[in-house]
Amino acid sequence: MAPGQEKPKKVISDCPDPPRITLSGSGPCPFITDGAVKNQKPGIIKKTTQVNGKFKPDSAPVGPEQSTAPISVGSWEDYHIFLTADDTCRIKTPDGEKRYTFAELGMSDKRKGDSPRQLWELMTLFATTGGCITGTVMARYNGGRGRKFDFQTATKQLNKHLQAYFGIKESIFTDHYKKNREYRTKMKFHDRRENVSTKET
């Protein structure tokens, strides 16, 4: 300090100290603060919830909103499935009626560019036969095809798929195939597509 220069006075502030940020970890943005998670990329801060004194990230969002099945009421006999196009149908339940695409029903094959799976192919065939596929229909359907359609496996998969989707535990079929040599559904199938003149019988 130069001779004759006054000693600067200490300024006392009433403002509280700023919050302390503790740096730790590694990565592009290693920090821990209330409401943030360490090792997050810049601009992506996840909401957290305090559990037992520790902050944990909330569950990630499920993704785009998808169509949900109508509330399951009654039994399969109360259900009607109307095939309205090659890729859509309407399903009527005691709780209401709703339009679905095969993708919304979980019947798309992601490996083939969201093309329909065999379950939708089987649903379409049930619609053309009014809900009953006999041995004659199966033989005619597989006639001249390069790859045989596995009805035994497909019907089991369709049964489990619709049971899980609508929350109804009973089988969609009236009897076992070996008893009547046919697959007959409890729900009613209707083919309402335009320009469809012939149906499998």
Image: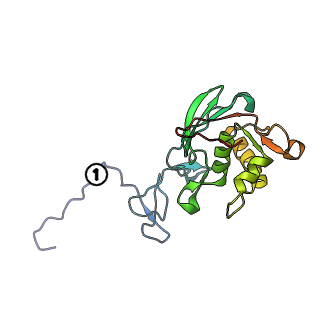
Q: Where does residue 181 sit, x and y in percent of width and height?
A: 85, 45
Q: Nearer the viewer, residue 60 or 69?
A: 69
Residue sitting at x 48%, y 50%: 47
The colour style of the image is rainbow
Residue sitting at x 24%, y 56%: 11
Q: Say above or below: 84 vs 74.
A: below
Q: Say above or below: 170 vs 57.
A: above
Left or right: where 105 falls relative to 33: right
Instruction: Count residues near mark 1 (Cα–Cα under 10 Å), then give few for <14, some for 14-19, many for 20+.
Output: few
Q: Amino acid at mark 1?
A: Ser
Q: How many marks?
A: 1
Residue lying farthest left? 4
Q: Nearer the viewer, residue 46 or 143?
A: 143
Residue sitting at x 47%, y 51%: 35
Left or right: where 130 falls relative to 96: right
Residue lying farthest right? 179
Q: Say above or below: 64 vs 168.
A: below
Q: Where does residue 131 sit, x and y in percent of width and height?
A: 72, 38
Determine which quarter of the picture holds residue 172.
top right
Quadrant of the snapshot with the C terminus: top right
Quadrant of the snapshot with the N terminus: bottom left
Q: Where does residue 36 sit, x and y in percent of width and height?
A: 47, 55
Left or right: where 128 falls relative to 21: right
Secondary-structure class at tag 1: loop
Q: Where does residue 83 sit, x and y in percent of width and height?
A: 59, 38
Determine which quarter of the picture holds residue 189.
top right
Q: Say above or below: 143 vs 27.
A: above
Q: Which residue is mark 1?
A: 13
